[in-house]
Image: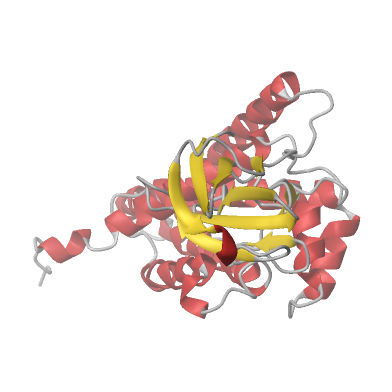
Amino acid sequence: MDTPPDRSPSRYALLPLRLFLGATFVYAGLDKLADPHFLAGVADPASMAAQAHAVAAHSPIGALLDQAVRSPTPAGLAMAFGELAVGFGTLLGLWGRLAALGGALINLTLWLSVSWGVHPYYLGNDLIYLMAWVPLVLAGTPQYSLDELIARHARGTAAGRGRRQVLVDGGIATLAVAGAVLLTGAGVARSRGRTAAPSAGAGTGTGAGTGTGAGTGTGTAVAAVASVPVGGVLRVAAPGSGDPVYLQQPEEGRYTALSGVCTHSGCTVNPPEDGRFVCPCHNSCFDAATGAVLQGPATKALARFGITRTGDQLHLGTETA
Ligand code: FES
């Protein structure tokens, strides 16, 4: 007796997750290929090699990361094209279970490296992505997919040819998708070569919003002068946005105000230690004096604010960069 077709809404249950993960991985792969810093050597703080180098000592897969540091271009290309293959495979539902397994392995690698130091653990988004892949690894992509079309076609062929037909059709579809992935990736990488600045400075910035002595008091009073001693730091909320801003007085009478919002994905960086701000989400590091990027994945310096002193109050001005 034929099983009646499934008409319950639950048959769509994995579709949103699949579309999200597939599109995100395609985007991530293209983004890496378009980034002029990504494949650079360890000297470029925004490169994958520099990130791997920074976390290798504290990662359980440090030996693998050291290998990536030694061979930045092959490792970076493998990562970018791996993400593209996973993304397209997941979106199209071609070898869907295998694509999901590839996605899970990529996120496992990222969790054990760039997200390994994230505390508490649930802020590490690579662990969340890893868990998100699990349902697709278990279920595959049996619906709305090339896998489904190929299986249906194989069932329609003469008896005994089904399995062979699946392999032939799957192979043809795989070659077509692999060609599309390679052409897309190569096109993006080539356009990167055309648009990259010849001496791109690894996303650094210099200078900090400073104020000295008794200014005119423009801006909003945010703290008493006494609360920011020489060498000290105070976190305040930016008037209007409420975003965190770190006030510092590196030397007598000179104040700086740097945004505490990480320019990578918006996490709040930790208070400065050993001359650097560290972002707890993906370990970007910024110079505590200038906000410049010391280590990616962030590529843009922390925003700076004007700061002046009037009497016993520090006034925060507008964002200057
Ligand atoms: S949000 Fe990713 S490094 Fe800060």
Q: Is residue 12 left or right of residue 134?
A: left
Identify the residue at image location x=80%, y=34%.
201
Residue at x 82% of width, y 43% of height: 40
Instruction: Return the residue nearer the eye: 16 or 146.
Output: 16
Residue at (46, 64) in percent of width and height: 97
Q: Relative to 185, is 81 above or below?
A: below
Q: How is the image coloured?
A: secondary structure
Residue found 65% across the figure and 47% down from its top: 80
**Residue 257 visible from this viewpoint:** yes
Towards the viewer: 293 or 239:
239
What is the residue that sits farthest to the front in this orientation? 311
Q: Residue furthest top?
A: 194
Instruction: List x then y, in percent, for residue 120.
Output: 51, 79
Spot occupied by residue 50 in the image (x, y as percentages of width and height): 80, 55
Q: Is residue 293 above or below residue 271?
A: above
- The answer to whether one can see residue 94 in this image is no
The quarter in which the N terminus is drawn is bottom left
Left/right of residue 289 with respect to residue 5 in the rendered view: right
Residue 310: x, y in percent? 53, 45
Q: Could you say which quadrant of the image residue 282 lies in?
A: bottom right
Residue 65 position by quadrant: bottom right
Q: Position of residue 233 (x, y in %)?
A: 63, 64
| Quarter of the image that includes the C terminus | top right
Q: How many marks?
A: 0
Residue 298 relative to residue 94: left or right: right
Give above or below for 253 relative to 37: below
